[in-house]
Amino acid sequence: MAKKPKFQRPTGMYDILPEDQKYFQKVLRACEGAAEFYGFEKIDTPVLEETALFEKGTGLSTDIVQKEMYSLRTKGGDYLTLRPEWTPGIVRAYIEHGMFNLPQPVKLWHFGPVFRHERPQAGRLREFKQFGFEVFGEVSSVIDAQIIQIFCNILKELRLKNIVVEINSIGDSKCRPYYKKMLVSYFRSREQGLCSDCRRRLRENPLRILDCKEEKCRFLVSQAPQLIDHLCEECHSHFKEVLEFLDELEIPYHLNPYLVRGLDYYTKTAFEIYENSHEGRQQGALPSGGRYDNLVKHLGGKDTPASGGASGVERIVNLLKARGLKFPQPPSPKIFLAQLGSLAKRKGVKLMENFRKERIPVAESFGRDSLKAQMARANKLGVEYTLILGQREALEGEIIVRDMENGNQTTVKLDEAVAEMEKRAKK
């Protein structure tokens, strides 16, 4: 039985090994391409923020704040929290750096780790990566549709198919209070049928009951009044326009009247995007988000409309792996540099740098002293030429160029080796 390593990664956290890096890089490149085309600029915020930022921004009654945050007290007495989501930190940066003075809208995107303490399972980790897009200073419904379009385009570029948007409007401060009263009245008479979390939510934030995944709660939710039937004129018009834009863009969507998202700051549009397959539904929502017109003011800034969303990277990577995504093999070096002797090794290291400056890939085995072993390595790599630098060649400032196909060898000046190989490459 193999001995268990003394140290292992923490529960719910993981190593991204070299063979998996290509999946994460592919997602990152898709995000970069979309950001560049749609005019978003990248932002990075600290992994640690003041705990109060998330309590006030995300909401005291949310599962993230009540159950999932990694918080600590510093030696100086500050209360800090590992970032459980990006939006409050980005809003803080928007306010702190006076971005409201810039030409509006301000369009920002992000890519990096977040941390949540929850039970690890498929598609749910305690440390995971998110990418997202945020727009500040634009009230128009077209921005909501464009955010959804960007996420759909990224998923399609990654060759995920059957993309479906679930969408709802959760109203605003004008129409939501009346709906909450209706909801409380409905659930209060059925309180004993709710799970313990939802009985608490009934007192603290009844809208969160609509987001519960417990089977017995889902049944009661399916019979509950629908917010979409009680929107004010402004919210109704905004939502109608968002759907019209999605129709024009031919983005398939499904109206989900019980979709509220798990965060307190959303207003009007809320959405989740799925890959409509067995594996996709197992992973859960990929991108999700919506409009949050009150959050900037709520955190101390000016009254600023905003809209955005984010996606877990690992869920997408899991789907890419399940689809058997193929990656092109990087081109192999056509040149191998073999050396024999301490002086030749020193000259060889310098020669490698000269090839690097000219962007000519070269393979080597500087750690090996045996010429036979190095030639075997060159054969295995299938290079076209091997440059052989022995002690005599190093002293005389020369190098041997061996054609690996026919075995012919020529000697050239060491300081002309790069130019010689460039000339042969062109031929």
Image (spheres, rainbow, N blue to C red):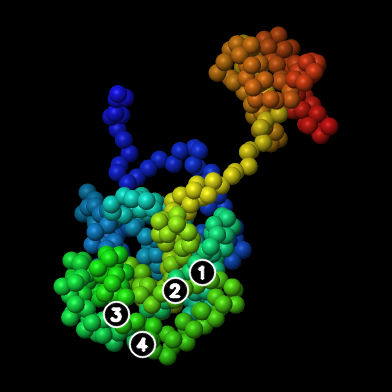
Q: Earlier in the sequence, mark 1 or mark 4?
A: 1
Q: Which residue is mark 4?
A: 230
Residue at image mark 3: 224
**Residue at 42% from the left image edge and 62% from the top image edge:** 285
Name, please, the residue furthest toward the left.
Answer: 192
Q: Amino acid at mark 4?
A: His
Q: CA distance from mark 3 to mark 2?
A: 18 Å
**Does 255 sit above or below residue 399?**
below
Residue receiving disc 2:
167
Which of the 4 image quadrants contains residue 31?
Answer: bottom right
- For the C terminus, which image quadrant? top right
Q: Earlier in the sequence, mark 1 or mark 3?
A: 1
Sooner in the amino-acid sequence: mark 4 or mark 2: 2
Assign a secondary structure to mark 1.
Answer: helix
Q: What whole-number distance in Å separates the C-alpha atoms at marks 1 and 4?
A: 24 Å
| Left or right of 152, for residue 187 | left
Which of labels 1 and 2 is toward the front?
2
Asked whether the residues under the numbered discs 4 and 3 touch, taking CB atoms below 8 Å apart as contact, a structural biologist would say: no
Q: Secondary structure at mark 4?
A: helix
Q: Which residue is mark 1?
A: 148
- Distance from Cα at disc 4 to Cα at disc 3: 13 Å
